[in-house]
Every structure is written in structure tokens, then in C-alpha cells.
Image: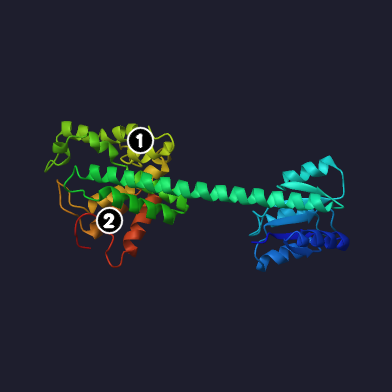
Amino acid sequence: MRNNIVVVDDDPVILQSAWNILSKAGMKTTVLRSGRQLLDYIEDKPLPDLILLDIMMPKMNGFEVMNELKKTKAKDVPVIFLTARDDERSEEEGLSYGAMDYIRKPFVAGVLILRVKNAVELIRLQRNLEEEVRIKTKENEQLFLHVVSSLAAAIDAKDAYTNGHSRRVAEYSREIAKRYGYNETQQQKIYMMGILHDVGKIGVPDEVINKPGKLNDEEFAQIKKHPVMGGEILDNITEMPEIADGARWHHEKYAGNGYPDGLKGEDIPEVARIIAVADAYDAMTSNRSYRKVMPQSKVRQELVDGRGTQFDPKFADIMISMIDDDKDYEMVGGGKCDK
């Protein structure tokens, strides 16, 4: 595949020389007379592999063109500045704008060809490396998600009434985060946190988790330990230090009367405030050992009543809007209930 090079210079002699040299070297070469022509060109043409850009041009100099390029789809196209000046200050300034190199005018044919070929090859190697890293990162993320999902399923299996609870909480949390404006990377992180929010239950006896009816004070004290245990387990994942936030603080309440640390309002990490709403919704729409599933209308009212006391109002409002958007009543938890 031929390299696609664009040369921008106000001097027609320089443009003709560059075109002759690069074309004879087998490169597809486009020559333009001004920065304005370049900006118009990239609007509807395939992006070039490399731009050779003169600095000293009328109306819009090379530095100004670089600033404008950063606002376009060509912001990542590498640029080499062309200059007839032997000025270290200009060269330093050009490199500070993001240019990858300088080429002096008038051109020496062999030098121009080598510099352009080397630049294009370096760019190609960088992009190949970035793609390899992206693929490996994606593979590692998928493996991590698989392991995390398997762990969450094992935890949910301790409670006969909460099959799929962690996955649903993760999905609701991701949707709340999406509606709130989190980007895809942030949404994926909160999904992970939602999946693992109950990981501390692995240290709670099964007979306590599955006890029918009301827990006594001692049993409830054991249940209340699971956020701390979960936080301690996940603190060991140093590659994603914030992953422990959801596990440790999803039972904190906005008014400050939650556990384990009694955090209040904005002091509760935002991801934990999101997961708290998702967790409460799934708990209310699932059968539990101590009660049957609640009607959706009552769940909605509980969220309304809990705004500003149990829940962060903005995230409670998003969850309420999700309920209102659920016209076909598909967003239910682990049990079947009436609207």
C-alpha cells in the first residue's frame, strides 16, 4: 500500500520539488498552497499518513494550522514542519505544538525520502503496537470479567433466594451510570464493582444468610461485617484500587446512618451511592428468606421516600426513571411481582 503524503507550502517551486521527489519514490503525494486548503482537504478526503507543513506562510502560519488541525478528525495525523530557517527557537516551538520532526529547505532528495520513509515506518510500528496492546488489554479484561462473574455466581449461590443478584445489580448500576453521563470505560468499571459488591458474604455463615425470618442482633452483626470483609478482599487488587469502594460502602446511607463507617452524603464514594440504589432495587424486587417480592409500585414509592435519606437523590431519581421507562415490565429482580 502506497504511503499518502500531503505537502503544504506557499512556494510553488518547493511544492513541485517535493512532489517530484516523493512521487518518484513511490509515494502518493498531494500538494496544497495554504493551511486553509489543508483544512478544507481533510474535511472530505481520506486522512493522509503524514503532513509536511511549511511554517512561514501568509494568512495562517504553520503553528496556527497545527492548532486548527487539533480540532479536526486529523488531530492524530503526524506532522513534520518544513522550514528554510536555521532557528533553534522556532524548532523548539514547533516541537512543542506536537510536530514529530523538522526538515530543512531546500530539500536534498535522498534526505527527504529517508526522513519521510522513517517517519511513516515509525508511525506504522507505533500504531501496530497500540493495536496489539488494545487487543491484549481487551483479552485480559474479558478474562478478568469471566473470573469475577464466576466468583459472584459462587457468592450468590450461598443464598438460595439471590441467584443472579450480583449480575443484576451490576447491570442496573451500569445503566444508572450511563444515564448519569459516565463514559464506556467508567460504565465497565462500575459494572465490575457491582458484580463484586457482595464479595464479603463469602465470610458469612450460610445458616445466617439463609435464615428464614428476622435475624437476631448477633446474626445481623455478622451480616453487617460483609462490606468490610469485601473491601479488604478487593483492596488486594492493586491494578484497580477503586474496585473496593462499592463493596465497602454500598450499605452507607445518604443521611449518614448506614454502615460500616457511617459516611454521609458526598463523603460516600459516588460509585457506592450508585450501587446502593441498584442493590436496594434488586433486593426489593426479589424473593428473600425474610419476605416475598414487593410490587413494583411499592418499590418505586420506597425509592421516592428514600431520596436524601437512604439514597443520593440524583441516583434515586435515575432509578425511578428506569422504572417508569419499563413499560413492558421487564426490569424485575429475582422474583415475579405485580406492578
For the residues bearing labels 1 and 2, Cβ distance under 8 angstroms: no
Q: Residues within 10 Å of mark 1 (few under 14, many from 20)?
A: many
Which of the pair 328/103 is nearer the observer?
Answer: 103
* Residue at image location 84% in from the left, 63% down from the top: 16
Q: Is residue 195 visible?
A: no
The picture places residue 13, in percent across and down from the top left corner, at 88, 61
Q: How is the image coloured?
A: rainbow
The answer to whether 127 appears left or right of 146 in the picture is right
Residue type, mark 2 in image: Gln
Which of the pair 253/34 is nearer the observer?
Answer: 34
* Residue at image location 68% in from the left, 52% down from the top: 120
Mark 1 vs mark 2: which is more N-terminal?
1
Residue tagged 2: 301
Looking at the image, is mark 1 or mark 2 nearer the viewer?
1
- Spatial separation of the CA atoms under disc 1 and disc 2: 34 Å
* Residue at image location 19% in from the left, 42% down from the top: 158
Residue type, mark 1 in image: Leu
Look at the picture and state if 28 lies above or below 159.
Answer: below
Q: Is residue 175 visible?
A: yes
Look at the picture and state if 326 lies above or below 273.
Answer: below
